[in-house]
């Protein structure tokens, strides 16, 4: 809730001219939330950045504190990018960096983006242990849980039709895993053993 209010405050201050965001396709942008982090888009002037930090300072009461030492300053297209007071990391224009493992920057290859998304989806598929479920249950798992998960991550990609076969093959492999009954037999054995031990 507090983060939503913070975004509205930054938007209002930008519209009033107190702080300056960046212009993209004729629209001004200032902030976006991603997981537990916030991306601030600002005109590369030390005074402007300080004004933004001063604007969000009251939200420290709600534990929305900007950790300057862990924060990174990323140059998108600024010519002058030198701020002596900045304590955190500095990422120059053209350098590919990662946020929560996802590659960001200018000219990130589709292969790198797809690889990260594939790792996430494979991890989720493996967590369901496909071989423990019969086919009709696996179909329900994909429809109920994995389909939306795959769709969410493919939205992060600037994908082409030829890339989709990779995701298609992942789902087909999940369906095609051989169903084993080892866990069921172990479960039944543990039910019957105590009865035999009591002489039943």
Image (cartoon, rainbow, N blue to C red):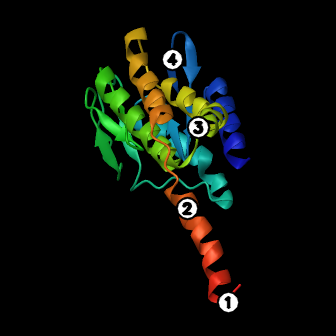
Q: CA distance from mark 2 to mark 3?
A: 20 Å
Residue 198 numbered mark, or none: 1
Q: CA distance from mark 3 to mark 1?
A: 39 Å
Tell me if mark 3 has few (under 14), some (14-19) or many (20+) residues whose alpha carbon lies within 10 angstroms of its own: many
Q: Is residue 76 visible?
A: yes
Foreground label between 2 and 1: 1
Question: Callout 4: helix, strand or loop?
Answer: strand
> What percent of the width, then of the height, locates residue 175?
50, 32
Disc nearer the start of the sequence (2/1):
2
- Where, quadrant-wise, is the C terminus in this rendering? bottom right
Identify the residue position indicated by label 3 in the image: 138
Disc nearer the start of the sequence (2/4):
4
Identify the residue position indicated by label 2 in the image: 185
Disc nearer the start of the sequence (4/3):
4
Disc nearer the start of the sequence (1/4):
4
From this view, report whether residue 67 is shown above or below residue 144: below
Foreground label between 4 and 3: 3
Viewed as shown, does residue 62 lie left or right of 184?
A: right
Identify the residue position indicated by label 4 in the image: 23
Q: CA distance from mark 1 to mark 4?
A: 78 Å
Q: CA distance from mark 4 to mark 3?
A: 46 Å
Foreground label between 2 and 3: 2
């Amino acid at each position: 809730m507090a983060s939503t209010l913070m975004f509205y405050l930054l938007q209002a201050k930008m519209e009033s001219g107190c702080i300056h965001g960046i212009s993209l396709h004729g629209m001004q942008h200032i902030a976006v939330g991603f997981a537990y982090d916030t991306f601030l888009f600002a005109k590369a002037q030390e005074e402007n950045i300080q004004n933004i930090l001063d604007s969000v300072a009251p939200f420290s009461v709600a534990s929305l504190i900007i950790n300057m030492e862990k924060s990174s300053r990323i140059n998108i297209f600024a010519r002058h990018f030198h701020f002596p007071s900045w304590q955190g990391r500095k990422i120059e224009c053209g350098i590919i960096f990662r946020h929560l493992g996802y590659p960001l920057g200018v000219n990130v290859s589709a292969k790198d983006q797809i690889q990260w998304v594939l790792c996430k989806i494979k991890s989720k598929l493996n967590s369901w242990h496909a071989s423990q479920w019969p086919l009709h249950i696996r179909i329900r798992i994909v429809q109920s849980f994995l389909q939306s998960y795959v769709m969410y991550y493919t939205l992060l990609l600037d994908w082409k039709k030829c890339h989709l076969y990779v995701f298609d093959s992942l789902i087909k492999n999940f369906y095609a895993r051989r169903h084993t009954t080892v866990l069921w037999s172990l479960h039944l054995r543990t039910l019957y053993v105590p009865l035999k031990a009591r002489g039943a």
